Image (cartoon, rainbow, N blue to C red):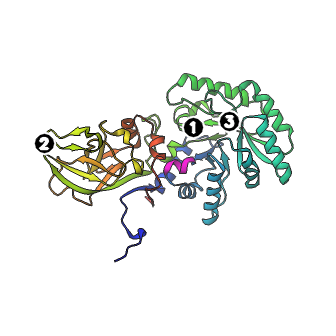
């Protein structure tokens, strides 16, 4: 029998819950004042969850989408057209190449700018198209990757306001350490408030997930709040977002079950050698799927039959070996499901836990899940 690839079972896949996404958006919304708007950050393929499906699921829950670049904005617009969804305003959070500016103006995306040159290029493109470019001036208050200095911010605001081809739609900055440095974050909030209060009417925004969960009471003056990680059910503080629900679980299957004797080495580098007879399972996932190789020999587990099973030796590109010696006869067999991120029974492995073993952050874990892993959309 000839099978089409679409008929073959998945070896490693990620379930994405639309109801969890909507729930998390409502949790974020409940923290806002009635006047504030909610911008869902959906860059990097919606943090690895799938941009088109996530944007369609959130279109009725949020007021804005924040993306990194024009291609992501275009993908959202195309998804909205296919789903007959009213277009949600889109802000490009990163600088764009000069050659992209006419396209950004034509598509009526809102754009982040930091320099006089950028403003002039948007003005020229808008004049040529007989449109008005929508600009958000970014001020660097500590992030350092983009934004004008505090000293030049007032001058650039005036430049935008005085130019008939561009609109000062917003003024923003960004928290570099809201989950780590409360004192510095409070200083940023104080300076930003003093700067934006006398400005002509425009949208003001600076708050990410950590800002929303940790400092929202100090920021009733802002117009837009920009959660990213919280939308996907991950709390950057690990303790303030208890109502959030993880929207993604990463799963694979057992492909092989073996009994090995004492002295058997496992995987590249022979970094693990059995000190006693063991039963081990080979899983159909590896760093080629985005499961981090850096968790090797650092205490990471997977879940099989609702129990934690330690990873043995190094994670390879396509396979992982785990210890299942403690599972009862019949609890594991080829075809059994293994949870890499998610919940099974009473146990859970979060993206945050996996990031800890990998010595990285949950943002990287989620966005690092590769295109080889199908995203399976589930309603619940």
Does any portion of residue 81 appear in the rendered image?
Answer: yes
Return the residue at label 2: 262
Decide which of 263, 321 is in the foreground and name it: 263
Q: Earlier in the sequence, mark 3 or mark 1?
A: 3
Residue found farthest to the front: 269
Please tell me the numbered disc located at residue 172: 3
Number of marks present in the image shown: 3
In the picture, residue 56 is in which quadrant?
A: bottom right
Give the Cα distance between marks 2 and 3: 61 Å
In the picture, residue 14 is in which quadrant?
A: bottom left
- Circle 1 packing at 10 Å, graded few (<14), some (14-19), many (20+), is many
Q: Secondary structure at mark 1?
A: loop
Residues rendered magenta in the picture: 43-48
Q: Secondary structure at mark 3?
A: strand
Residue 22 lies left or right of residue 158; in this view the side is left
Tag in front: 2 or 3: 2
Give the Cα distance between marks 3 and 1: 11 Å
Decide which of 141, 223 is in the foreground and name it: 141
Residue at image coords 36%, 65% = 9
- Circle 2 packing at 10 Å, graded few (<14), some (14-19), many (20+), is few
Decide which of 87, 72 is in the foreground and name it: 72
| Residue 46 lies in the magenta stretch | yes
- Circle 3 packing at 10 Å, graded few (<14), some (14-19), many (20+), is many
Please tell me the numbered disc located at residue 208: 1
| Residue 209 lies in the magenta stretch | no
Magenta part mainly helix, strand or loop?
Answer: helix
From the top left corner, tell me how far across and down residue 242 is, in percent. Answer: 43, 40
Q: Earlier in the sequence, mark 2 or mark 1?
A: 1
Assign the C terminus to one quadrant of the image.
bottom left
């Amino acid at each position: 029998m000839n099978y089409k690839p679409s008929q073959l079972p998945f070896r490693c896949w990620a379930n994405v819950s639309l109801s969890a996404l909507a729930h998390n958006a409502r949790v974020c919304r409940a923290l806002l004042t009635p006047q504030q708007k909610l911008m869902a950050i959906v860059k990097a393929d919606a943090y690895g969850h799938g941009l088109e499906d996530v944007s369609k699921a959130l279109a009725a829950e949020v007021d804005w989408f924040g993306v990194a670049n024009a291609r992501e904005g275009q993908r959202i617009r195309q998804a909205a057209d296919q789903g007959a969804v009213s277009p949600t305003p889109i802000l490009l959070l990163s600088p764009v190449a000069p050659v992209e500016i006419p396209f950004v103006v034509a598509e009526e995306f809102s754009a982040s700018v930091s320099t006089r040159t950028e403003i002039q290029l948007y003005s020229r493109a808008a004049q040529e198209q007989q449109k008005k470019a929508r600009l958000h001036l970014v001020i660097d208050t500590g992030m350092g990757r983009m934004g004008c200095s505090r000293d030049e911010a007032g001058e650039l605001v005036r430049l935008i306001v005085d130019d008939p081809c561009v609109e000062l739609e917003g003024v923003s900055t960004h928290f570099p350490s809201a989950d780590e440095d409360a004192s510095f974050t409070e200083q940023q909030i104080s300076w930003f408030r003093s700067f934006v209060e006398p400005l002509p009417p425009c949208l003001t925004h600076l708050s990410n997930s950590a800002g929303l969960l940790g400092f929202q009471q100090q920021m009733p003056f802002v117009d837009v709040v920009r959660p990213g990680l919280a939308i996907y059910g991950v709390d950057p503080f690990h303790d303030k977002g208890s109502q959030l629900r993880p929207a993604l679980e990463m799963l694979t299957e057992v492909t092989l079950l073996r009994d090995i004797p004492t002295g058997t080495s496992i995987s590249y580098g022979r970094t693990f050698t059995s000190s006693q007879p063991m039963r081990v399972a080979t899983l159909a996932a590896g760093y080629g799927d985005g499961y981090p190789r850096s968790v090797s020999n650092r205490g990471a587990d997977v879940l099989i039959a609702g129990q934690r099973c330690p990873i043995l030796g190094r994670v390879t590109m396509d396979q992982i070996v785990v210890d299942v010696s403690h599972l009862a006869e019949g609890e594991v067999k080829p075809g059994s499901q293994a949870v890499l991120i998610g919940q099974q029974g009473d146990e859970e492995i979060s993206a945050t836990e996996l990031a800890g073993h990998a010595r990285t952050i949950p943002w990287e874990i989620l966005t690092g899940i590769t295109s080889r892993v199908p995203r399976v959309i589930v309603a619940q």
